[in-house]
Amino acid sequence: MNSDMDSYKTLLRGAGLLFIGIFASKILNYIFRFIVARSFTPSEYGLFALGTAIIGLFMAIALLGLPSGVSRYISEYRTRKEYDKLRGTITFSLKLVTISSIIITICLYLSSNYIESFFMKDGLSQVIKILCIGMPFYIIFTLVINMFYGFQKSEYVTISGYLSENILKVTIILILVFIGFNGTALPMTWTMTAIIVFLIALYFLQVKTFPFIGIKEKFIEPRKELLVFSLPLIFVSTMWIILQWTDTIMLGYFMTSKDVAIYEMVLSAGKIVLMFATMFSVVFMPLITSLYTNNKTKEIEAIYKSTTKWITVVSLPICIYFLIFPKMTIQLLFGSQYLEGASVLIILSIGYLIHAIMFLGGSFLAALKYSRLQMIIVIITGILNILLNYYLIPIYGIIGSAIATSISFILWKTTETILAYKITKIHPLSIDLLKAFIAAAILSVLVKYLIAPFVNNLYSYAIFSLIFFGSYILFTILIKCFDKNDAESIELILKKSPLKIPYIDILLNWIRK
């Protein structure tokens, strides 16, 4: 098999494992939200959501931009077999982040009363103080997860980063609700989960991946190289968190805790559209780094286009279904008290779809060491997001926040993709993307006018969902959205899967023609 296919194998092996983890974690996450929606008031959840948004901002600062740096340099040193620098990268980054996380956590804990006064939300200080206990553990856990990406150990990301975290969240919240805890059960769940997943991830790094504690071999800490790459990414990661949490934080300032809760719940549903882009991007960046190190430009272009196609093909039908059935989706996931967010789901789905299609542009720039350029793009986008939210929230409320977030996210990733093309003359677009949109457009019209009138309960929603997604997959195959490399990829996935799909050989032969 040629080298292109070998790269596909590497990508799919990692993405396939991540898919299992992300898919399972999404189910567990929505079970968690289902429990929360029915066990706590929207005001209680809104207070917790605002607290985690504030915590997330401080976590980004404490990480010092190192997650992307360690992922990239671990991949590079591993490819070059420079194990002394590899071990030095791990030890140096862990020491630095441990110190910064402790300092930032203490500052946040001492400032919690002032933050509560600023937002004028009673109880916010208590939520922040509980979250601060788990904050250093979650910060280090985040760094270790990015180390696994560099080692291309997707199985450990899946186990510790997706499965363990979400299983623990569901289990702990059920126990605390059963015992009779009030709204403090939410930050307590987050904190206890953070401590346990930190221990799990550290075990997999030290015992299963690359031992670094108690090793007497000499190692080199590439401090300057790592910091020169990573420090500009402090602004990138901080602005990324601002992009993620600006809407929540500013809603917390201008609107009620209930509005924050409705927006946050619906936002979590809209992010399903981004799920596959996230899944592929974390495997894509280390792989592209490895290919770039070996000057394999043609393979980079092939992987870039193919991965973007897969992201688009999978994300499109999810977005369309949210556009056609927003209220039914919210009712199924969160209950009727969150139905006010139907318009928000429509707006965010469109924004996240375009964001997903262009998602890999940033990973491409990071692999090529254009971290400063990313910094400038994200800072500009973050400022724009703040200004849009500041202007639109007082006028349109949660709908204004959704508009601001969608515009910012679209401009951010589109700019990165365009600049990546200017630098490399490689772009992610292909005729197959157009075919996917044609298939989605035709089926969406059929669903809207022939199926939607009959979807009046959750049972019919589930049945027609299966019909829609099945028809979409079949249609994309028939109009040849996929090529022979994709056929090999599908076959590779199916060999690892216990599922037996009828007539799959016929479809694969059709793709290969």
Image (cartoon, rainbow, N blue to C red):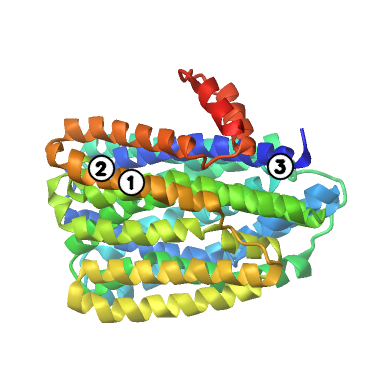
Task: Please tell me whether residue 34 is drawn above or below residue 352 in the rendered image.
Answer: above
Disc 2 and disc 1 in contact, CB within 8 angstroms: yes
- Badge 2 element: helix
Per the model, the C-alpha gap separating discs 3 and 2 is 38 Å
Q: Is residue 29 left or right of residue 92?
A: left
Could you tell me which residue is drawn at 19 percent across and 63 percent down? 259
Q: Quadrant of the C terminus?
A: top right
Residue 153: give x, y in percent of width and height. 65, 40
Q: Is residue 425 left or right of residue 223?
A: left
Residue flagged by tag 2: what amino acid is it?
Leu
Residue 501: give x, y in percent of width and height. 47, 20
Mark in the foreground, 3 or 2: 2
Per the model, the C-alpha gap separating discs 1 and 3 is 33 Å
- The crowd level at tag 2 (other Cα within 10 Å; few <14, some 14-19, many 20+) is few
- Badge 3 element: helix
- The crowd level at tag 3 (other Cα within 10 Å; few <14, some 14-19, many 20+) is some
Numbered badge on residue 446: 2
Q: Which residue is mark 1?
A: 442
Could you tell me which residue is drawn at 54 percent across and 63 percent down? 102
Q: Which residue is mark 3?
A: 7
Residue 444: give x, y in percent of width and height. 29, 46
Q: In terms of image quadrants, where is residue 233? A: bottom right
